[in-house]
Amino acid sequence: MQVTELSAEGLKRSFSVVVPAAEIEATRDKRLAALGRDLRIPGFRPGKVPMSVVKKRYGTAVTGEVLEEQVQTATRDLLTERGLRPALQPKVELVGDFGEGKDLAFNIEMEVLPEIPMPDFSGIEVERPRAEVSDEEVQKAADGLAARNAKLEDVAEERPAAKGDIVVSDFVGRLVEGDGDDATVGEPFPGGTANDMPIEVGGEGFIPGFTEGLEGIRPGETRKVRVSFPEGYGSAELAGKPAEFEITAKALKTRAAAPADDEFAKSLGLESAEKLREELRNSIQGEYDGLTRLRVKRALLDQLADRADFAVPEGMVEAEFGQIWQRVEEDRKAGRLDAEDAGKDEDTLRAEYRKIAERRIRLGLLLSEIGRTNNIQVGQDELFQAMRREAGRYPGQEKQVFEFFQKNPQALENLRAPIFEEKVVDFMLELAKVTDKTVTVEELQAA
């Protein structure tokens, strides 16, 4: 194999590779001879099929296999011998037409990973904001849990529905065409009909204006409520469109007051109200600690980005930008762009998001190199636990989920990558100067 470097510009490399015809023919003939020994063809004794017959029947297919293997082997050897680490899959292009007795000539183009200098972690200073759960928060959470689990009781008195009441209703939704007096109501749309649906007056979880429109309704009364689906609604057929719901109230109920006492705690499988409050405190503190982790990680990565000064492969940036821009285009079509982005022209947006893509690639390469240099690895147990968590999201399909990951290396890598990143972050935080600071919940959430 003859290798010639054609160009080396920045991170881009280009090589010319020539594999002698004799080498290809020797490999092909050896493969055909092995194939001939196992052939069973009428008129010939086993293992005695003439090479001319074997070559006529299988020569083209075997030659194709040999050529593909030669390209793969030559590429792998080139990378190994020259110590090259390609950023993306190398691009291979054949030169001329290959034929009997001809050398195999092809060019290999690639971008290589840059040399990445290690930052001085001891020079990184990070503030870790921490918030503690108050007794009042715990009690509020316990009372809220008790209220949400309270039994529904019929309202004995005859009165209109008030905010917080539960109206058991039937409803039918129809899209509205036109405006004002010219508006017309169409046929019921899929998913817009329900029977015996308990709806909290003024509650959340429905289209804005829907539950508010039930205030004052009485059992037996039918009312029409006009609303508009949000622009970012999950169904594109309904997003941003006005609709009219015809609602019939069938019963009026209210939640029975239920204190968060020992009896309520036991109904949830806990020993006592104190144990319930302990569980809630741990849960809320876990949420706060999660926010703390996000703030610390963001501050750490911001400082790393300021210290990272090396070229990044254009192909990786282009691929990352393509994914980002696709989401931007989808948000723009759905009207989900924030006010700041919505006021910018496309060229400005492209330039800004390309910088974001470049920053992500640079940080990703740096984190990967830190992990590689310091032998940070994700163990099989950690991957297995990640698969178990993912499988837990699909009750009854756990086996299929495990089989999916076993058969799809890229999907498994998508599980491994975030675990690896968190371990690298932990490694850096051990070396950086981290200062704890007690803050209020509001300050933590606003950070």
Image (spheres, grey):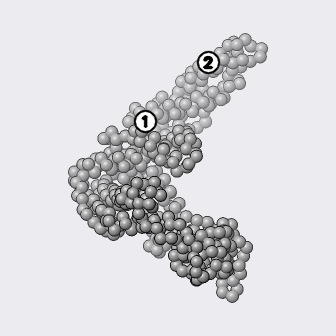
Element type where label 1 sits in the image: helix
Amino acid bearing label 2: Ala
Element type where label 2 sits in the image: helix
Name the mark on residue 92.
Answer: none
Residue, far right = 43
Query: Which residue is painted at 51% across and 76% down in the image?
Result: 164
Query: Which residue is painted at 48% across and 35% down in the image?
Result: 75
Q: CA distance from mark 1 to mark 2?
A: 30 Å
Q: Position of residue 302 (x, y in %)?
A: 32, 59
Earlier along the polypeptide chain: callout 1 or callout 2?
Answer: 2
Q: Position of residue 376 (x, y in %)?
A: 34, 41
Query: Which residue is painted at 66% across and 84% down in the image?
Result: 179
* Mark 1 nearby-residue class (10 Å; few <14, some 14–19, many ≥20): some
Foreground mark, 1 or 2, reads: 2
Amino acid bearing label 1: Leu
Name the mark on residue 34.
Answer: 2
Q: In the picture, which quadrant includes the C terminus?
A: bottom left
Residue at numbered disc 1: 79
Residue 211 seen by the camera: no
Give the answer, above or below, for where 243 lies relative to 87. Answer: below
